[in-house]
Image (cartoon, rainbow, N blue to C red):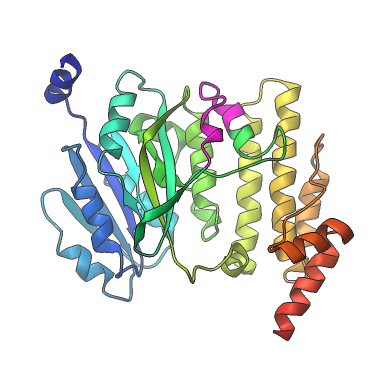
Amino acid sequence: MERDFWIMIEQPLVSVIIPLYNTERYIEQCINSVLNQGWPNIELIIVDDGSTDRSYEIAKAFEGPKVKLLRQSNQGASAAKQNGLNHATGQYIQYLDADDLLHPEKIEKQIISLQNNPNKIAVCTTAHFFDEDIVNYIADDDRFFKEYLNDPLNFLIKLYGGFDLMGGMIQPNAFLTPKSIIDKAGPWEKSISPCTDEDGEYFARVILHTEGIIYTPEILNYYRKTKTQSSLSGKLNTTTCSNLIKSIWLKHTHLLSFAKSDEQITAIHNATYRSLDQLKVWIFLVYDNLVSEIEVYQSKLKPSLKPSYHKMGGAAINTIAWLFGWKIAKRFQVLKQKLF
């Protein structure tokens, strides 16, 4: 009762930032998931990144006192998020992709968890769902939220697989972040856009500038996938792949700047070597010039652990990789794709 009374007196503003690009099918549902939040003090900032479908027109129908719509030429997700951040006036920042959804109590529960922890960031479990089937979601393994919550550097090392080569990921919508921490972490890194890890590089800096992470398991961040969604390899081209290498190395330097022991430094080297190795497997025989670039970066590392086996796809190809090595498996995989 006392807590509820305090909340009624002081309700900090939350700025929700949605970068929008050609998502006409889902943007209305996404916006409604924000407007239907239990937390009443919200400003929604939508940044249309040069959409060529009806996304902008659909979003414009929501424009009003709580919803601000911005428009820019197509510059990529990082530029759109930074544009939204530049216009944000809230004490907390919630990023949200235009095809995803928030649990109705997400912001409220995370605000409450952060009220006595101004230098921490809140995170929740991500639920993956396909197309419109939000009922049959698959929740992420939350093992990464149970260790090192009060140690941001070790939290990231664990997440990136630096201790045991068993890494994972956190979908960025799962976070709610005090604006004061975001200001310390710095702007979105537009030089690595486009790539598949713009969020990862950004939130690595954000987390490193916190005093810890608060896990709120009772709420969900809903991350939409589609049956036709392309794999990582389908999203890579020469530009995105080159930028991904830069992103991985930037994260490496960010983590090293916070390291306090030789053990942490070695674990960071393990994590970076692992990330580069995974990418090398994906692009082998496709972008061999970038494979050479990755190997140059790997030669600068001194890991104590190196991946001995790579999952390549289905059971058959994984068996080939296990028995004969990933390069032979990848050659077989590429040949099969050409033939069929």
Q: Between residues 296 and 141, which one lies in front from this camera angle? A: 141
Please name the residue shown 12% across and 25% down the image.
8
Q: Between residues 103 and 296, which one lies in front from this camera angle? A: 103
- On the image, the x and y values in percent for residue 66 come to 15, 48
Please name the residue shown 55% across and 52% down the image.
197
Q: Quadrant of residue 24?
A: bottom left
The answer to whether residue 295 is magenta is no
Q: Is residue 8 visible?
A: yes
- On the image, the x and y values in percent for residue 169 come to 55, 45
Please name the residue shown 37% across and 42% down the image.
220
Q: Between residues 273 and 330, which one lies in front from this camera angle? A: 330
- On the image, the x and y values in percent for residue 3 come to 20, 18
Quarter of the picture containing the N terminus is top left
Residues shaded magenta: 141-155
**Would you say 211 lies left or right of 276 here?**
left
**Would you say 29 lies left or right of 100 here?**
left
